[in-house]
Image (cartoon, rainbow, N blue to C red):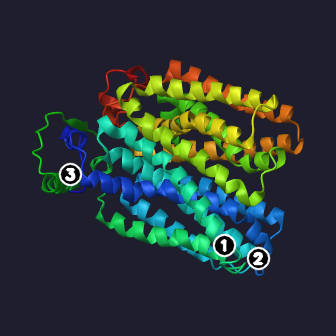
Amino acid sequence: MAPDQPIRGTFTDVPARLDRLPWSRFHRLVVVALGITWILDGLEVTLAGSVAAALQTSPRLHLTAEQVGLTGSAYLAGAVLGSLFFGHLTDRLGRKKLFNVTLGVYLVATALTAFSWDFYSFLLFRFLTGAGIGGEYSAINSAIQELIPARLRGRVDLAINGSFWLGAAGGALLSVWLLDPELLAPDMGWRLAFGSGAVLGLVILYLRRFLPESPRWLMLHGQPGEAARVVDGIEARIIASEGVTLSPVTARLALGDTHRTTLLSVARTLLRDYPGRTTLGLVLMAAQAFIYNAIFFTYALVLTRFYGIEADKVGLYILPFALGNFLGPLVLGPLFDSVGRKTMIFATYGLSGLLLALTGWMFAEGMLTATTQTAMWSVVFFFASAAASAAYLTVGECFPLEIRALTIALFYAFGTLLGGVGGPWLFGVLIASESPTEIVTGYMLGAFLMIVAALVTLRLGVKAEGRPLEEVAPPLSMRVELADPPEKRR
């Protein structure tokens, strides 16, 4: 047995020490250095859509419309496979190792995309870019939740997830300049667009040098002494930067033998120990993924086909849409910590479903213009964005630490596949009919799914606000010490 290996009867106060910390410069560094992932994803998705026409007219690539679509599918496939592969490694090897590796994969791949010489090289580099971003989701979500104090976990997690839309807005603005033929050559704009992501990635890779490994991961992987030393360092940084005195802690966690994660233990945990939470996670992820991907990725088609908006003006309508999506989690996030997870998830899913149904009806009745349609979508997704961010929060905090990253990856993969394939395909078919009535069918389906998710939350929602992660979902190594089954501890 290694010198730092925990044995039954070993106790640690690491979780309590982390949760009692005041908000500080250290936590702001965590948010910036790790939360940038969502901005990068928003930037990538928006730029990829914006440069589609440029890729077809590129003197070097001259891709067909079908090839452009395939590159989008390659990015999606990379994100799904990357999340699963790197998610498994994150639970095995540690948060810090993997959030540096995944950012490195993204950085190199998106830089290589800028130097693509034909369709196949472009396809490969987009796949690898997606793999890096997908891996980031599992590594970063788990690290953030384990480093942020319990009383602030909800608002911080929602704000970070909502920052995707800052990247989307930035991508929309950047594309206007990069794709202007009077400023840049046709084959240069799209290359600079992808290269910009690599430059931002380099800055963040530098910032991540100053972040420690998750002490919670260390304490459950045979290194409780190192976990305590890391917390000592964090506390020293906070005392020096904030000039505060930290109160002592008395709560301690009993450590058992280090759990060895296998596919069987993951399946047993999800399906036997936490069937209600697994069902809740699937429903929440499916509903938000469907309406987000279906509506956002077909929004430009609705504007051009039904409202006659010129293609180069679509970005102006995406900006207020992105603003509503960002403000939702930012404004409503604190309520997830004060009012509570269950109440707020029910409210945001329910309200967004009802407002989506109302918007669909008004669209079918011809009561909307491009401007009022955008205004309505901004209101709908003010609530839907908070709901979607809460889905990621839920699947991250409601399962044991030993399988947290892989669990996030599994739910992310499910939501991405459903929303990225099923939703846009269905809406593409409905829009092709050029019948408002047909499109409203899709809107009503999305509204129905959101309302169902709200009702499921009333039955299966978890009251995780303000509670330590180890109380919301006890570590697997503690399972023998629990008096009640996990599902009874809601």
Q: Where is residue 27 in the image (x, y as percent from the top left)?
A: 29, 51
Q: How far apart are marks 1 and 3 (CA)?
A: 44 Å
Q: Mark 2 points at which residue?
A: 58
- Considering only vertical position in the picture, is 99 above or below 142? below
Q: What element carries label 3?
A: helix
Q: Tell me if residue 285 can be seen.
A: no
- Of pointers 3 and 2, the one earlier in the residue sequence: 2
Lateral position of residue 221 relative to residue 303, left or right: left
Contact (Cβ within 8 Å) of mark 1 with mark 2: yes
Say which amino acid is labelled 2. Answer: Ser
- Of pointers 1 and 2, the one earlier in the residue sequence: 2
Q: Report the number of discs.
A: 3
Q: Nearer the viewer, residue 231 or 354?
A: 354
Say which amino acid is labelled 3. Answer: Val
Contact (Cβ within 8 Å) of mark 3 with mark 2: no
Label 1: few (<14), some (14–19) or many (≥20) C-alpha neighbours in 10 Å:
many
Q: Name the residue under label 1.
A: 190
- Of pointers 1 and 3, the one earlier in the residue sequence: 1
Residue 362 sits in which quadrant?
top right
Q: What element carries label 2?
A: loop
Q: How far apart are marks 1 and 2 (CA)?
A: 9 Å
Q: Nearer the viewer, residue 5 or 350?
A: 350
Q: Which of 264 and 282 is in front in this view?
A: 282
Q: Name the residue under label 3.
A: 231
- Considering only vertical position in the picture, is 383 above or below 184? above
Residue 230 sits in which quadrant?
bottom left
